[in-house]
Amino acid sequence: MNTEKIISIVSSAGEQWERPIEIENTNLPTFDTNVFPKWLGDYIDAVAEETQTPKDVAAMASIALLSTIISGNFEVQLTNNWTEPLNTYTVMALDPANRKSAVFNLFLNPINDYIKKQSKTLLPIIAEETAKRTASRKRLNVLQEQFSKTEGGKEDISLLNEIEKLAKETDDQLNPIIKVPRFYTNDVTPEQLAQLL
């Protein structure tokens, strides 16, 4: 569908939209950081100044960061039946060596601090759960071997019940092991990204 048709369809519905900006147009408006609270707008301006990058880069990084922090905690209710989560997907389409990483690093510090704190708390719990699960799997293998040599008596039913219980306890899909949270990734292939998600 071409642009003219889109405009005429929208116009016939009673709304008048401005003509869309052509994709090839490189003369875009400057990002207005006044749309943010003062503390955030000031930080975005400072990051842009320090890294010598357009304000748009720092603004998009801040939106991505804030989205990461509040994702899953809040949503916008547009109508009685329509809600939207507050997560966003941002892309910085700049050529290499345009200091995208420098900008992102200045915004990732709070997330990295949170991950470090969570790691200190969760790693001992994860190690304990992993050790328990490993021991349970070994016990499950022994019981399955033992059950394969039985003839189906009363004791065998009790053994089978224990096997079923251990199988459920050690199933990673039924009982996933806690993981240290991960909120972002660097260069990644589409296949790796699917696994991370």
Image: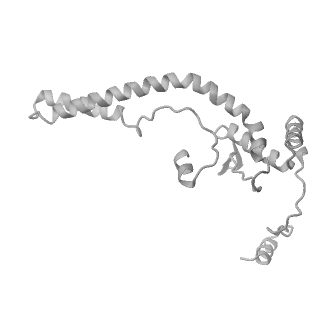
Q: Which residue is drawn at 89% across and 63% down?
A: 27
> Would residue 160 appear left or right of 127 to someone viewing this image?
left
Placement of 13 over or under 66, stated as above or below: below
Residue under the point 12% across and 28% down: 154
Q: Which of 26 and 153 lies nearest the eye of the viewer? A: 26
Residue at left 64%, top 45%? 186
Q: In which quarter of the image is residue 4?
A: bottom right
* Labels in figure, total: 0
Q: Which residue is drawn at 25% across and 29% down?
A: 162
The front one of 188 and 43 is 188
The image's colouring method is: one colour
Residue 19 lies, in percent from the top left, at 85, 70
Residue 43 screen position, x and y as percent:
86, 37
Establish if 96 lies above or below 103: below
Establish if 74 lies above or below 156.
below
Which image quadrant: the N terminus?
bottom right
The one nearer the camera, 81 or 66, is 66
Residue 31: image location, x then y, percent = 87, 51
Mark yes or no: residue 15 visible: no
13 horizontally vs 132: left or right:
right
Image coordinates for residue 108, horizontal then vertical, percent: 72, 36
